[in-house]
Amino acid sequence: MVKKTASENIDEDEITIDIDEPEMTIEDLPGVGPATAEKLREAGFEELLAIAVMSPMELAEQAELGEAVSSKIIQAAKKLANIGGFISGNALLDRRKTVQKLTSGTSAMDELLGGGFETQSICEVFGEFGSGKTQIGHQLAVNTILPISQGGLNGEVFYIDTEDTFRPERIAQMAEAVGMDPQDALDRIHVARAYNSAHQMLLVDEIKRMAKSIDVKLVIVDSLTSHFRAEYVGRGMLASRQQKLNKHLKELKQLSDVQNALILVTNQVMSNPAALWGDPTKAIGGHIVGHASTFRLYLRKSKGGRRIARLIDSPNLPEGEAVFTVTAEGLKD
């Protein structure tokens, strides 16, 4: 649309062009009818870009389509989608402004994390048994329900429990401590017990489905690696285990980006006998989990019932430590 000023002379600086291009959807793909579109959506493919970056074999498996059909759909999606995806640093900075911070309930840990736990990220918390991993999960579940003005996210929580560690009684204690009705808190925390690694991965798909009608702000997987560790035993199974774990983490990261949610995963540890100096404790999952996690917190027990949280990896924060205690009312400085 060309706009003229009061005078007949048109200055170049006064010309604006509005181009309203309709957003392309899955239904715009050539050869994709309502039935195929429904299959793609049920498999979690809402955007063309998500289809364009898939391999034919993966798309065929996830959407229950033929590999030849999947290949044609992917090629069409590549033509219609904006594959480039490059944006300016300023545009990315504006996008980062949508990131929210969730309080841990302790000023020391919030300060360590630059104001709290970030949405649109995966935070891995690992440490020995009794170090406070599950307690942090329970506390963040309660805090997520709090209003934004109180450091919460005013959203719903999904808890994938792989080791039968979720305790509603603990949630009730922590909710009362922050002035919240325990029944209201428990109503907004949705818990599922994962019985094996395949079930654990399917539960993420179920969260994506439910997220269409529920404001998901926190997903907790406690613990991330226990089933994978038990089912894929020995060096011969290591590659398969890591591939499955990598896929699981990518699905969780996609969920965090789409929902502007925080993903909290707890992780088991093992002792490295080859370490001659320093702490021999290391997280399970190797580089796959390490690279997929945006923030990594290592917990360890200290004297007098205290716990120490050490930030060992972050894209923008320095390493550091925070001391906290676990009380009946929750996490405290």
Image (tube, rainbow, N blue to C red):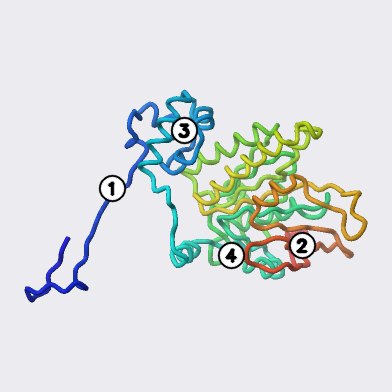
What residue sits right under mark 1 in the picture?
Answer: 22
C-alpha gap between disc 3 and disc 4: 34 Å
Q: Which numbered disc, 1 or 3, marks the residue closer to the eye?
A: 1
Pick whichever, 273 or 99, lies toward us. 273
C-alpha gap between disc 4 and disc 1: 38 Å
* Helix, strand or loop at mark 4: loop
Q: Which numbered disc, 4 or 1, marks the residue closer to the eye?
A: 1
What residue sits right under mark 2 in the picture?
Answer: 309
In the image, residue 20 above or below residue 64: below
Tell me the kind of residue under disc 4: Gly
In the image, residue 305 above or below residue 185: below
Pick whichever, 209 or 1, lies toward us. 1
* Helix, strand or loop at mark 2: strand
What residue sits right under mark 4 in the picture?
Answer: 151
Q: Which numbered disc, 3 or 4, marks the residue closer to the eye?
A: 3
- Residue that lies at the very extreme toward the top in this rendered image: 66
Q: Is residue 135 left or right of residue 206?
A: right
- The first of marks 1 and 3 along the sequence is 1
